[in-house]
Image (cartoon, helix red, strand yellow):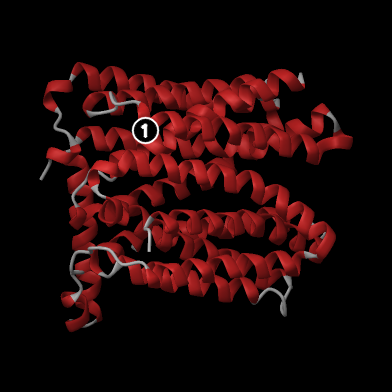
Amino acid sequence: MNRKVFLYVKAFSDLGTFMDLIAINVLMYIATGSPAWLAATMAFRTLGGVLSSLFSGVLADRFDRRKIMIWTDVFRAIIILSLIPFPNPVMILVVCFLIGLTSSFFAVSYSAEIPQIFGQDKVLETNALISRLTSISLVFGFIGAGLITDFLGYQVTLIIDAATYLISAAVLIKIKWQTTEPANSVLITNGFKQKVSQIGRDLKEVYTFILSVPMLLYVNIVFLVGSFAGASHNLGIPLLAETIDSSKQSLIYGLIWGVWGIGSVLATVLLPKMKFLQGNHLYRTYFFAAILMSTGFITFLSNLNIWIVLMFAFFTGIFDACFTTLHATILQKTENYIRGRIFGVGMLLKSLGFALGFVVAPILLEALSLAKMVWIFHGTLITSSFLVMLYSNANRKKYKEVNQSL
């Protein structure tokens, strides 16, 4: 079977994930009518991601990543379907927590295994395709979920979502690729205390590795700040849509993300053609992408003219896709034996940044306007990126490249 098929099945699975975001929110609101319960669904999903990212990287390096992906797909299908007979608020929160938990396991193993499946020389091209398909899934997932949930009910949306996970698992079972022997013998033969000690040593090894490669450390610092800043526009875009025209909030909300998605698709078509994205140019482009992405979010979230908003949403989508694609590419340059833990750290930073952002954003929004709140969040990312660029350029000769380290 052509290995690229899995990328398309993964995109189909992403489509289901974006659909269940809408369906679960609708289900929670039907059950409670409370915005606080709605906020809790996001909080529990993020909490699950934070907890699992503490050790998902260790497991990805110690066990067969392919089997981790298969079992997490199956488990996600089961927990999504459990909402149909038990659609009560507590069960919804449990499901959100478990989705966050298992999605982190899948994402870390999947990202760490990309170079093994497609080859190290195809990493940027493959990541660009993954980002492109994810953007398309996001656009159609949100629109599709709204239509299916409205016309057929949330149950149908959840069944489709579960089916995408099962299809993904079935394709993974069929696809074969060259994998390294999982280093699990220590964890199997030793007792519980030894297992905990081994996980502790594994985590210490990955943090020592990151600290020994300064550019990798700086990339992750910017990624953490970027995840924090991301909370501001995730909260801000629906509020902006309501301010522009409250009677057409859903349409404008969908249009903004739709145009953003088109920009993302364009970026992922162009990125593989940029042959200069090697060495220091790869890092520099990553930092520039963060700055331009934040500039775009600040610009369109400070405007009420729909045409200006959509134009800069398109611009922002281009550099958002560059930012996420280049981040994955940089992390995938690390050695296979530690790559799972490196992605585990990335997932932890993403979850922590996002969680902190969702705590701070509503507080700032109470005291300030939407535009000022976004200025503070994305201004922090712009400042951080500039400082890291200046510092790394001044000390460039001291740094070794990720693929030359250890």
Q: Position of residue 85 (x, y in %)?
A: 72, 80
The type of residue carrying mark 1 is Pro
Q: Position of residue 331 (x, y in %)?
A: 29, 43
Image point (21%, 46%), residue name: 334
Q: Position of residue 190 (x, y in %)?
A: 18, 81
Q: Which residue is mark 1?
A: 272
Which of the two residues, 6 or 14, is positioned nearer the viewer here? 6
Dot 1 crowding, Cα within 10 Å, few <14, some 14–19, many 20+: some
Relative to residue 6, is residue 120 depicted above or below? above
The answer to whether one can see residue 336 in this image is yes
Helix or strand or loop: what does disc 1 sit on?
helix
Image point (68%, 25%), residue name: 310
Asked where in the image residue 406 lies, by quadrant, the reply is top left
Relative to residue 11, is residue 326 depicted above or below? above
Query: Could you tell me which quadrant the N terminus lies in?
Result: bottom left
Relative to residue 296, is residue 151 depicted above or below? below
Q: Position of residue 209 (x, y in %)?
A: 18, 46
Relative to residue 16, is residue 84 depicted above or below? below
Which of the two residues, 309 or 7, is positioned nearer the viewer here? 7
Image point (39%, 58%), residue name: 53
The answer to whether one can see residue 377 in this image is no
Image point (53%, 20%), residue name: 295
Q: How many numbered discs?
A: 1
- What residue occupies the far right of the structure in this picture? 247
Which of the two residues, 371 or 360, is positioned nearer the viewer here? 371
Asked where in the image residue 128 lies, by quadrant, the reply is top left
Q: Is residue 318 left or right of residue 387?
A: right
- What residue occupies the far front of the structure in this picture? 1
Asked where in the image residue 314 lies, by quadrant, the reply is top right
